[in-house]
Amino acid sequence: MHSNTNTTFAKRMIDVAILRCQVYIKTNYFFLLFCLITFGEIYAQDEKAEGYFINLKGDTTNCMILIPLTWPSAELDIESLEKSFKYDSPGNMRTELMPKQIKEYSFKYKEVTYLMRSAFYCFLSDKLSNKDRNLFMRLRVDGKIKLYTYTNYTGAAPSYNGTNWVGGGVSNKSSQQILLKDNGDCLKVKKHGLKSRLKDFIPECSKVLDKINKDEYDLDDISFLVDDYNYWCK
């Protein structure tokens, strides 16, 4: 009888301890969440780098550009750089500009030069969606024909409402390639109809056209096509 009483008492103490733990977790959940978010924001603060941007009139402004970092890896957040441009304006005021407000911006970070061009003012042979046009593209290959890339989302991707990027959740991401001529003509590189689209875009370069007709360029070979064009067709 005495043993059963001790066992019952022990079970009750365990139940009380579990209940107290549950109450503690519930009452401190938001505090712990707040600490985690705050730590993340502090840890992944924007860095700054000297750079410039070119406005719609073609004027160049030198400035300190804010460099967003991922958390917790503290790596350069290229997807944030694609969505908007932030810099310190006179008076140390943080200013944010969207792709439709400037032509391009550039900076150097950890010995790597980044040039981001607005897709908003490209004259595309096929119409870009609203979310595609409201992005900055990163220069990958320079020359008479340039190769740019930006992040392409499929699934629950963030959307652009005309002012800001909103929503988004789990989605697949890939690198979208864009070809850009000096006259502003752009081509969104797609696997479907790639051969005919490339031929229509660069009919003036016979050597590259010959290689296109021989199927020497696939979706993963676009950088080689750009190099060939810029070497043979200057």
Image (cartoon, rainbow, N blue to C red):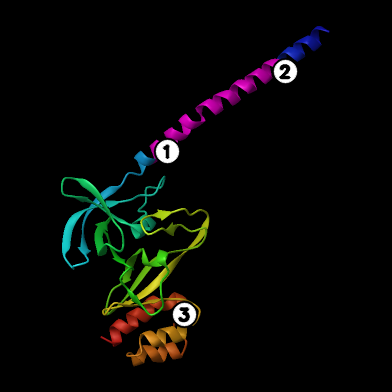
Q: Where is residue 72 in the image (x, y as percent from the top left)?
A: 41, 45
Q: What element carries label 1?
A: helix
Residue 122: image x %, image y %?
32, 73
Q: Name the residue under label 3.
A: 218
Q: Nearer the viewer, mark 2 or mark 1?
A: 1
Q: What residue type is labelled 1?
A: Ile
Residue drawn at (41%, 84%) of the image: 198
Q: Which label is found at residue 37?
A: 1
Q: Can residue 216 be seen in this view?
A: no
Amino acid found under the numbered disc labelled 3: Asp
The residue segment tinted magenta is: 12-40
**Front in this rendered view, residue 168 or 25:** 168
The three-letter amino acid code for the residue at tag 2 is Lys
20 magenta-colored: yes
Residue depth check, mark 3 versus mark 1: number of the one nearer the observer: 1
Considering depth in this image, is 201 or 45 the residue closer to the camera? Answer: 201
User: In 3D space, how far apart are the residues under numbered discs 3 and 1 (Cα atoms)?
Assistant: 44 Å
Which residue occupies 28% across, 74% down?
Answer: 142
Which of disc 1 and disc 3 is earlier in sequence?
1
